[in-house]
Image (cartoon, helix red, strand yellow):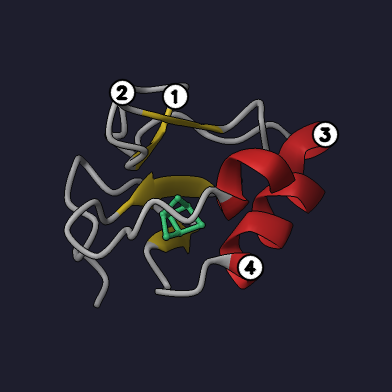
Amino acid sequence: ASYTIVEKDTCIACGACGSAAPNIFDYDDEGIASAILDGNMGIIAITADLEDDLMDAFEGCPTDSIRVSEEPFEGNPNKFE
Ligand code: F3S
């Protein structure tokens, strides 16, 4: 299983992730992204049917703000950095 979380401090609101994975990422009023399934905590596993979208978003983020791991992030985007 994969978990995902957005590092909001480096997100530049480019909008790519929500296009690639609209069921996983959405934006706040300023366009900063977050993972919608678990309030950007990175604790709910992404289902297999969304895995391709997730990897598209991961690879497409220009600032590497989307983190993906096989272990939960517990709310810390830099847990595995
Ligand atoms: Fe931000 Fe990257 Fe998405 S810059 S809007 S997290 S593609």
Query: Counting residues from the N terminus, which is met first, the one under dot 1 or under dot 4?
Result: 1
Identify the residue position indicated by label 2 in the image. 39
Query: What is the CA distance from the residue labelled 1 to the residue labelled 4?
Result: 18 Å
Query: Counting residues from the N terminus, which is met first, the one under dot 4 or under dot 2?
Result: 2
Query: Counting residues from the N terminus, which is met first, the one under dot 2 or under dot 3?
Result: 2
Q: Amino acid at mark 1?
A: Ile
Residue 11 image position (x, y, % from top left): 32, 58
Residue 71 image position (x, y, % from top left): 40, 53
Q: Are marks 1 and 2 in contact (CB under 8 Å)?
A: yes
Identify the residue position indicated by label 4 in the image. 60
Identify the residue position indicated by label 1 in the image. 36
Disc 2 element: loop
Nearer mark to the viewer, of 3 and 1:
1
- Density class for disc 3 (Cα within 10 Å; few <14, some 14-19, many ≥20) is few
Residue 60 image position (x, y, % from top left): 63, 68
Marker count (numbered)? 4
Q: Amino acid at mark 3?
A: Asp
Looking at the image, in which quadrant does ligand 1 appear?
bottom left
- Density class for disc 2 (Cα within 10 Å; few <14, some 14-19, many ≥20) is few
Q: Amino acid at mark 4?
A: Gly
Q: Amino acid at mark 2?
A: Gly
Identify the residue position indicated by label 3 in the image. 49
Residue 7 image position (x, y, % from top left): 26, 56
Quarter location, residue 56: bottom right
